[in-house]
Image (tube, grey):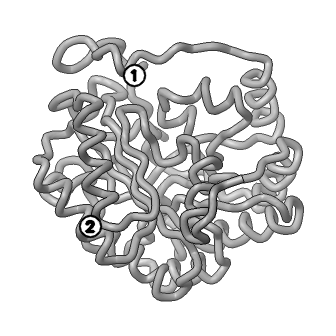
């Protein structure tokens, strides 16, 4: 049975949230239409499962990050609000339902992610491939971004997904290496960086992307070292955002990083040669992903985005 933490806390672990993290919730007609379509298509979203603070904003512009392969994860990371336990059965019809929803929403860009599926022989790699192929058939004008697990100990999984040639291959390192044992048990920083390097080696024209959270107790020098490691792996796009504690059972917030520090991180990342950097307290992996992809592609082409 899946374990679901209690409802998200309203205050901060070290005082109330600062004003720059206040989010206005507004259920617009577009928000309600997006929610209704996700329900009708029986699709999970990381927006809901991970308690994303940007849910209302994104759904109001018909942007949702679809989470395939169920809503129960085989790992229990200290930062993540997704339920942990015995995973759901893999639904072979999910790729077709996903593609139909993408077409109905008229998306220019879609982000597809999943829970960790360590129980599957390929970690779910084949399902990602089927989702990419289904979207390409049903909505050929839509660009596809995937956000995959690390596929650790799943030989050939990364290669299989990369061969499907998503427009963007995203895999988040999440935090600095020193904090992995506490924040991301079962994962390896070195493995995650190697995954991103392998994708770029196999498919040089595929954009690669990664992100990390700050406010977990990392030092600035450690964040800069992560940037260096990702650039060594030829990662194109970096996201940095504030960690927000989903429930009292999760890792506490060590500090709320002010917007000026995020601006400093952005400048540091840009100086290292990332094609695009998104760095702000509310930045998440898929926040404004459609807009950012257009900027990414324009940066590579040396032209202004349309």
What residue is pinned by disc 2? 188
What residue is pinned by disc 1? 6
Q: Position of residue 247 (x, y in %)?
A: 33, 25
Residue at image position (64%, 68%) is: 167
Residue at image position (47%, 48%) is: 285
Pick whichever of labels 2 and 1 is earlier in the sequence.
Answer: 1
In which quadrant of the rendered view does residue 165 lie?
A: bottom right
Give the class, few, some or many, for how many residues have Cα within 10 Å of label 2's Cα (few <14, many ≥20): some
Q: Position of residue 12 (x, y in %)?
A: 26, 18
Does 65 sit left or right of 150 as displayed?
right
Above or below, 21 relative to 124? above
User: Depth-wise, is mark 2 or mark 1 nearer the camera?
Assistant: 2
Q: Position of residue 219 (x, y in %)?
A: 10, 47
In which quadrant of the rendered view does residue 25 lie?
A: top right
Residue at image position (35%, 40%) is: 241
Give the class, few, some or many, for how many residues have Cα within 10 Å of label 1's Cα (few <14, many ≥20): few
């Amino acid at each position: 049975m899946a374990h679901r933490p209690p409802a998200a806390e309203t205050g901060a672990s070290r005082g109330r949230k600062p004003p720059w993290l206040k989010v206005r919730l507004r259920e617009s007609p577009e928000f309600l239409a997006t929610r209704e379509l996700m329900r009708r298509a029986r699709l999970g979203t990381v927006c809901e499962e991970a308690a994303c603070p940007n849910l209302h904003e994104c759904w109001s512009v018909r942007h949702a990050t679809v989470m395939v392969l169920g809503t129960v994860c085989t790992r229990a990371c200290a930062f993540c609000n997704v339920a942990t336990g015995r995973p759901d059965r893999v639904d072979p019809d999910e790729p077709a339902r996903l593609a139909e929803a993408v077409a109905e929403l008229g998306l220019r860009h879609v982000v597809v992610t999943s829970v960790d599926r360590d129980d599957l022989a390929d970690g779910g790699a084949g399902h990602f491939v089927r989702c990419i192929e289904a979207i390409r058939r049903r909505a050929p004008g839509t660009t596809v971004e995937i956000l995959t697990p690390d596929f650790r100990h799943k030989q050939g999984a990364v290669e299989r997904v990369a061969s499907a040639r998503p427009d963007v291959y995203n895999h988040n390192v999440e935090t600095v290496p020193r904090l992995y044992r506490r924040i991301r048990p079962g994962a390896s920083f070195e493995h995650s960086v190697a995954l991103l390097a392998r994708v770029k080696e196999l498919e040089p024209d595929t954009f690669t992307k990664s992100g990390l959270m700050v406010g977990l107790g990392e030092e600035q020098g450690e964040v800069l070292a992560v940037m260096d490691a990702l650039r060594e792996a030829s990662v194109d796009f970096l996201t940095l955002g504030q960690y927000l504690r989903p429930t009292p059972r999760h890792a506490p917030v060590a500090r709320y990083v002010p917007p000026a520090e995020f601006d400093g991180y952005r400048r540091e990342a840009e100086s290292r040669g990332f094609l695009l950097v998104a760095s702000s307290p509310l930045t998440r992996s898929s926040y404004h992903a459609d807009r950012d992809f257009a900027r990414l592609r324009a940066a590579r082409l040396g032209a202004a985005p349309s």
